[in-house]
Amino acid sequence: MSDTFDIKYAAAATFSSAKALFDAAGKVKDAGYSNWECFSPIPVHGLDAQMGYARSKVPRFTLVGGVTGFFTGMLIVWFMNEFDYPLIVGGKPFFSPIYPFPVFYELTILFAAFGTLFGMFFLNRLPRHNHPIFEHPDFGRTGDDAYMIAIEVEDPNFDDEETVEFLKSIGGESVQIVREPID
Amino acid sequence: MSEVKELDQHEILQKVDPAPWKEVPLVLNNRSYKWVTDKICGIVEAKTPQWWWWCFITAMCIASFTGMGLVYLVSTGVGVWGNNNPVNWGWAIVNFVFWIGIGHAGTLISAILCLLKQKWRTSINRGSEAMTVFAVMCAGIFPLFHVGRVWFAWWLFPIPNANAIWPQFRSPLEWDVFAVSTYFTVSVLFWYMGMIPDLAVLRDRATETWRKYFYGFFAMGWRNANNHWRNFEMAYLLLAGLSTPLVLSVHTIVSFDFAVANLPGWHTTIFPPYFVAGAIFSGFGMVLTLLLPLRAVYGLHDLITQKHIDNMCMITLATGSMVGYAYSMEFFIAWYGANSYEGFAFINRAFGNYWWSYWIMVSCNVICPQLFWFKKIRENTPLVWIISIFVNVGMWFERFVIANTTLSRDFLPSSWGYYSPTVVDIFTFFGTFGFFSVLFLLFLRFLPLMPMCEVKSVMPQANPHADH
């Protein structure tokens, strides 16, 4: 099929420095946009506050993982050495919170680490191997030395011409509408 | 009141004329972001250099020694190793502790130095973490195979087996199973997570199809968005916070393998901190051994600067001195504790049947790193490299001394013996260096050697409040 359709995804502009991106992000926020995103090769210091993001929620996943790990450790030691098959070894108690502490400790860390990684994936909605922003010809450079702001079509304030003009007015370069092709 | 204070300070500042703070840049020659990307990605994207193939083939040949050693061991029985009464723990435990200790510097650099905001860690971070993962893999071989019937090694894990008997959690060896497997898993997670943004860069630069799929798959669709960075940074900090107590606990628990036993020379409370310091010491030795040649081969002098080498040498010096302190404190406590067995164990260590290994250990671990006090020596890169080799040798001997001097001289002179490794022991251990090198060479070839996003973060361009 030679016919291809596409869906408008966002208006995007590139910036040449972290400072330009930082200043522009403040202006986008002040202009009242809500569905927009910054792209940068590094985590830009202070950009979260500039964009109005709250603190990341990853620690909650870490905490849940850690608590689960600790009690899983207790459970397996109690179940295996006290409940299911008690073995007398050196006259020590079958179960105690003291002697197998290294096991609880390690499992706390193990589960907390998994919670952290999967929490990060979940909050970032990853893995997602395709995304309309990848269609922007300069997207690849955002991992190298370019900075980008994209304002999505879904934003209530989005307007084809006005948003493009706005991005130009805040110093954006190579401003364009990103389209997601559908074959 | 506060106004007056501010005014005072201001006047004082004008009078004293504070000396300018000269900060050495972490990336030399005012490099651009593009240069960093091209440099690091270029290592992976360029045609495989000829030296790589020579090294790889050599490493494979060396690794085959481990293969042969293990095949012979499994097909014959664990008696082909030199372990025997009274030294039931020979090279296997020595090699295990040696390799796992090497891993510790990687975690120190990636986790502890991250929490301490040591920005210089960024360029040596990824390579050291890779070293950690591969070193733990080498370490795992020895306890796995020393169980004798390796096909039952899964009994170590809490999985139901045909005998309906569970693992015995009162044994420090079982704690070790949990500590080492957790350490390996968390190190891999940390290593991989830090690599995701760099894999995305390689994905976006890829021209060949297999690269697009390979890096695309592992980059998980990362898109450099600030929302991603926000959660990534938090997760990175948390993993650093989790790895710090982890790395300290792993070698603590490894030292429990010895310290929980009621044997003179082992049953001491100094073991956990002494083992951890030794582990970091040996690990930094290995980091220097690996990174200095890479720096020369790939021309990374702007990224791994003299400041980095200085810092690594100073950490080696500090931890080497701590280890030296521990050696002398052990002797002091053996005398002060007035236990005749303990006293004998230490005199035997220094002047007994294994005196030569003790003095190799002291000269490599305590005397050798003292050379790092001198700037001239730290700036002589080939010499630093040679000293780093001595550190590796010395730390292997430390574990040999601890394990063998105590076991070979038991409580009863009738059971005394002298341990010597067999050729199978030697082959198996020698081969692990090849195995390690094979893995490290593959890492160099396919994965980004340095975390580009982190290196860029410590460059002046990263400051959002200044024009560059």
Image (cartoon, rainbow, N blue to C red):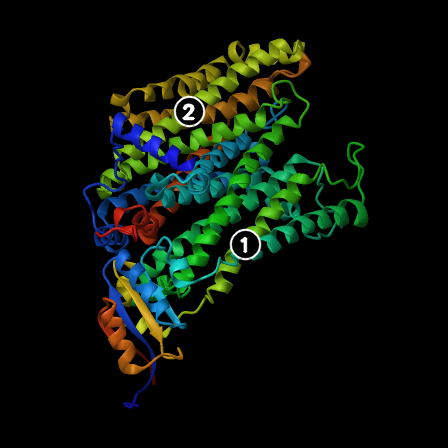
Q: Measuring 63% from the left and 15% from the top, which residue is drawn there?
A: B416
Q: Amino acid at mark 1?
A: Pro
Helix, strand or loop at label 1? It is helix
Q: Residues within 10 Å of mark 2 (few under 14, many from 20)?
A: some
Disc on res. B318: 2
Q: Residue at x 33, y 22 (%)?
A: B372
| Residue nearest the observer in this picture, B374 or B61 | B374
Answer with the quarter of the image where residue B1 lies: top left
Residue B380's x, y, as percent?
Answer: 24, 26
Residue B14 is situated, as x and y percent measured from the top left of the image, at 26, 30
Q: Position of residue B96 (x, y in %)?
A: 52, 35
Q: Residue at x 30, y 30 (%)?
A: B11
What residue does disc 1 label?
A59
Looking at the picture, does residue B303 appear above or below residue A134? Answer: above
State which chain disc 2 sits on. Answer: B
**Would you say residue B344 is visible in this rendering?**
no
Quadrant of the frame with the N terminus of chain A: bottom left
Nearest to viewer (mark 2 / mark 1): 1
Look at the picture and state if B417 lies above or below A73.
above
